[in-house]
């Protein structure tokens, strides 16, 4: 790559052109342009990705109260970050919509119990499992 091509890459990149467009206009490899730009920390002023369009609406995080700028054509955000989202849901377990709650009767003690998410459970506790598994005095091995 010549010094003239390097200067052209810097100039075109500053104008907001992408790697492919620069490579095509200078007649050099896309990877050569990309490597040169990354090695020399040359970025374009305009982002290659489409910019996020914010609506005028601002909501506030339900956990900490920080303002959240809403993005157009996306679901409205309720929390500013994952930390706040997890903290809020952990403190509001009563509002979780649990659909996989199963009801069973313990095979050992007969007590009725319900469990979330595991439909194969047989015992209400580990103690009942151990008592039923080893009820013959440990000769079942």
Image: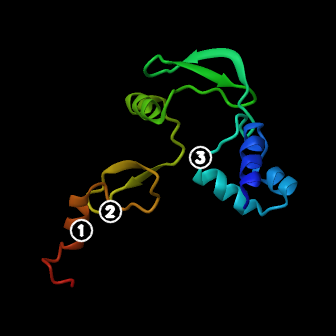
Where's residue 38, x and y in %?
61, 52
User: Which scheme is used to colour this image of the protein?
Assistant: rainbow
Residue found at x 31% / y 54%: 124
Mark 2 neighbour density, 10 Å: few (under 14) some (14–19) many (20 or more): some
Q: Earlier in the sequence, mark 1 or mark 2?
A: 2
Asked whether the beta carbons under mark 1 and mark 3 sit within 8 Å of each other, the answer is no
Q: Secondary structure at mark 2?
A: loop
Neighbours of disc 1 within 10 Å: few (<14), some (14-19), many (20+): some
When asked about the image quadrant of residue 23, the answer is bottom right
Q: Name the one closer to the observer, 47 or 65.
A: 47
Image spot of residue 45 (x, y percent): 70, 34
Q: Residues within 10 Å of mark 3 (few under 14, many from 20)?
A: few
The residue at which mark 2 appears reads as 107
Q: Quadrant of residue 77?
A: top right
**Which numbered disc, 3 or 2, marks the residue that appears first in the sequence?**
3
Q: Which mark is residue 59?
A: none
Of 31 and 109, which appears nearest the observer?
31
**Side (left or right) of 20 relative to 94:** right
- x 51%, y 27%: residue: 80
Which mark lies nearer to you, 1 or 3? Answer: 3
The Cα atoms of the two marked residues, 1 and 2, are separated by 8 Å
Residue indicated by mark 3: 41
SS category of the residue bearing label 1? helix
Circle 3 or circle 2, nearest the eye: 3
Which numbered tag is attached to residue 132? 1
Residue at x 37% of width, y 55% of height:
105
* Nearer to the camera, 73 or 101: 73
Q: Residue at x 68, y 30 (%)?
A: 75
Above or below — where is 53 with respect to 99? above
Q: How many labels, in total?
A: 3
Of helix, strand and loop, which one carries label 3?
loop
Q: Is disc 1 in contact with disc 2, using a CB cutoff of under 8 Å?
A: yes
């Amino acid at each position: 790559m010549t010094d003239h091509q390097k200067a052209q890459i810097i100039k075109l990149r500053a104008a907001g052109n992408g790697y492919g467009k620069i490579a095509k206009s200078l007649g050099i490899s896309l990877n050569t342009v990309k490597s040169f730009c990354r090695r020399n920390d040359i970025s374009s002023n305009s982002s290659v990705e489409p910019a996020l369009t914010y609506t005028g609406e601002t909501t506030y995080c339900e956990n900490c109260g920080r303002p959240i700028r809403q993005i157009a054509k996306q679901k409205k955000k309720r929390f500013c970050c994952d930390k706040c989202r997890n903290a809020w849901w952990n403190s509001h377990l009563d509002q979780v919509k649990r659909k996989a709650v199963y009801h069973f009767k313990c095979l050992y003690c007969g007590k009725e119990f319900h469990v979330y998410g595991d439909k194969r459970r047989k015992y209400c506790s580990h103690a009942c499992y151990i008592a039923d598994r080893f009820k013959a005095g440990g000769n079942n091995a």
